[in-house]
Image (tube, helix red, strand yellow):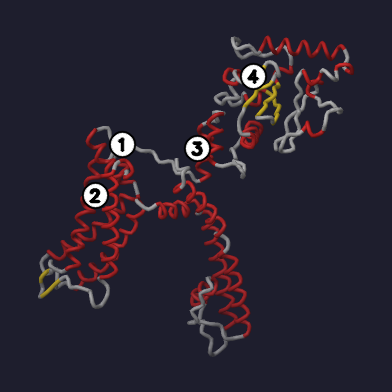
């Protein structure tokens, strides 16, 4: 809990005769404010100067805290310091602190004035108390706003909206928490807008949802064909007797899939709001890359002596591998794949740290194992680069056994290498897990923005 400031005025002091249980709320927080009624019992012990000061303070506050007045500098220094009551939790701070954020609810004197209780001389908010702890700290110390662990995301965002915290601060909080803020950018033309929503946003209409389902099915079919056609008993020939074989079943199904992918690219390119942004989007680049190998292969087959050219066969085999990028087309329709991509993007610093540690350990242990095994006739590691493979496999705890140390010192180095590998592999795990949990909760849950 943030510690509120306690004034030196007697009406803010707690009488020692009060019951201790009455001085605390359910969370054990002290009630720092006393109403004028609660001080009547202690009136006999107060001097006449204190009573006159209280009367002057109340009159001055009631005079200056009028809804018809403009922001001002009061005649009393205590007027620059006010009390905030958040569902029984009391805070006190200088007005100059909150006035540094004039666009917020508490930082704008006119906005906060309607919550002022003249009788108790405080600002009362019947709001969520644990959330205000974070907001209070933001006013006091600035910087980023942090959500307390016990506070749910939806309640915290609702409270930030009520207190009108700056938009850039809230956006920064959402980015750190893993919120996915998708902006629906639509073309100005009416027909292009309908076509773009049909192809890009499946949730906008039943027909758009059907189009998305068909796209997923055809994408999965093309991936299955890519794998199945490599089986020895099912592999077909693109050419028969020096001529292209267009009746080959795999070629026909591949043609059908490519026609659909081409139609998707053409329609989306025609209806997109911005051609420049279209070609900058990774998903659109994947769509274009997925259809290029087919047309290159087809043009190669239709070329003179295309079936008799040995180099064309090697190029066609390479282009078939390029078709594997179609698996990334599923990222448009799979929330899980999108979460994985976002997780690795957010964890890039942790992964780089892991990569650096891995490279250092590989260099260290490959050098150590080489010199430890050097001079042994049956040694399997003949050079330091030869030890790179052994070090990587040992640190990853795979242990193929194709290269192993044979000397006693080499075995000790191998044991240390395996232990170091376990510790090194553990570096990025907490970072990736934390980012994955954040993105998964906001991407697939009800808090998606």
Residues tagged 3 and 2 counted as in contact (Cβ below 8 A): no
- What mark, if any, has residue 116 been given in the picture? 4
Q: Could you tell me which residue is drawn at 21 percent across and 47 percent down? A: 266
- What mark, if any, has residue 186 been given in the picture? 1
Q: Earlier in the sequence, mark 1 or mark 4?
A: 4
Disc 3 secondary structure class = helix
Q: How far apart are marks 3 and 2 (CA)?
A: 33 Å
List x then y, in percent, for residue 333. Answer: 35, 51
> Counting other residues with Cα less than 10 Å from the Cα at mark 2, is it few (<14), some (14-19), or many (20 or more)?
some
Q: Distance between the residues labelled 4 and 3?
A: 30 Å
Q: Which of marks 4 and 2 is nearer the N terminus?
A: 4
Q: How far apart are marks 1 and 4 (CA)?
A: 45 Å
Q: Could you tell me which residue is drawn at 54 percent across and 40 percent down? A: 173
Q: Where is residue 19, by image quadrant?
A: top right
Going by the picture, which residue comes out furthest to the bottom? 377
List x then y, in percent, for residue 336. Answer: 42, 54
Note whether 205 is above or below 30 in the view shown: below
Q: Where is residue 329, by image quadrant?
A: bottom left
- What mark, if any, has residue 264 been given in the picture? 2
Relative to 250, is 371 on the left or the right? right
List x then y, in percent, for residue 83. Answer: 70, 24
Mark 3 highlights which residue? 171
Q: Distance between the residues labelled 3 and 1?
A: 22 Å
Relative to 209, is 298 on the left or the right? left
Disc 1 secondary structure class = loop
Q: Distance between the residues labelled 4 and 2?
A: 59 Å
């Amino acid at each position: 809990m943030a510690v509120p400031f306690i004034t030196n005025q007697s009406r803010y002091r707690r009488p020692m005769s009060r019951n201790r249980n009455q001085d605390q709320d359910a969370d054990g927080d002290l009630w720092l404010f006393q109403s004028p009624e609660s001080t009547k019992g202690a009136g006999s012990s107060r001097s006449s100067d204190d009573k006159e000061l209280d009367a002057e303070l109340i009159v001055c506050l009631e005079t200056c805290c009028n809804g018809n007045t403009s922001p001002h500098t009061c005649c009393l220094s205590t007027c620059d310091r006010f009390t905030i009551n958040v569902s029984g939790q009391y805070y006190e701070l200088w007005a100059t602190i909150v006035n540094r954020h004039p666009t917020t609810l508490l930082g704008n004197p006119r906005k906060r004035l309607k919550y002022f209780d003249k009788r108790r001389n405080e600002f009362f908010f019947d709001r969520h108390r644990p959330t205000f702890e974070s907001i209070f700290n933001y006013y006091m110390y600035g910087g980023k706003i942090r959500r307390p662990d016990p506070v749910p995301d939806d309640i915290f965002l609702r409270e930030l909206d009520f207190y009108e915290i700056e938009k850039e601060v809230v956006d920064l909080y959402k980015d750190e928490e893993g919120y996915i803020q998708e902006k629906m950018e639509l073309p100005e033309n009416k027909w292009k807008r309908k076509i773009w929503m049909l192809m890009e946003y499946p949730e906008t209409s039943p027909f758009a949802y059907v189009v998305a389902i068909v796209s997923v099915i055809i994408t999965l079919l093309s991936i299955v064909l890519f794998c199945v056609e490599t089986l020895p008993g099912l592999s077909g020939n693109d050419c028969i007797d020096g001529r292209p074989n267009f009746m080959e079943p795999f070629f026909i199904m591949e043609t059908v899939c490519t026609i659909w992918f081409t139609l998707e690219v053409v329609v989306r390119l025609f209806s997109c709001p911005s051609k420049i942004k279209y070609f900058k989007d990774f998903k659109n680049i994947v769509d274009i890359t997925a259809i290029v190998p087919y047309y290159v292969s087809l043009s190669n087959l239709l070329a003179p002596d295309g079936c008799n050219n040995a180099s064309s066969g090697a190029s066609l085999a390479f282009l078939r591998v390029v078709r594997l990028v179609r698996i990334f087309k599923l990222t448009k329709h799979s929330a899980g794949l999108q979460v994985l991509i976002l997780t690795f993007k957010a964890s890039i610093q942790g992964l780089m740290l892991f990569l650096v540690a891995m490279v250092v350990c590989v260099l260290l242990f490959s050098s150590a194992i080489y010199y430890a095994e050097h001079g042994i006739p049956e040694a399997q590691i003949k050079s330091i680069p030869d030890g790179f493979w052994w070090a990587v496999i040992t640190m990853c705890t795979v242990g193929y056994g194709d290269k192993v140390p044979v000397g006693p010192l080499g075995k000790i180095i191998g044991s240390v290498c395996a232990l170091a590998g376990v510790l090194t592999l553990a570096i990025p795990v907490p970072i990736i897990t934390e980012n994955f949990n954040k993105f998964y909760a906001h991407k697939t849950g009800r808090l998606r923005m």
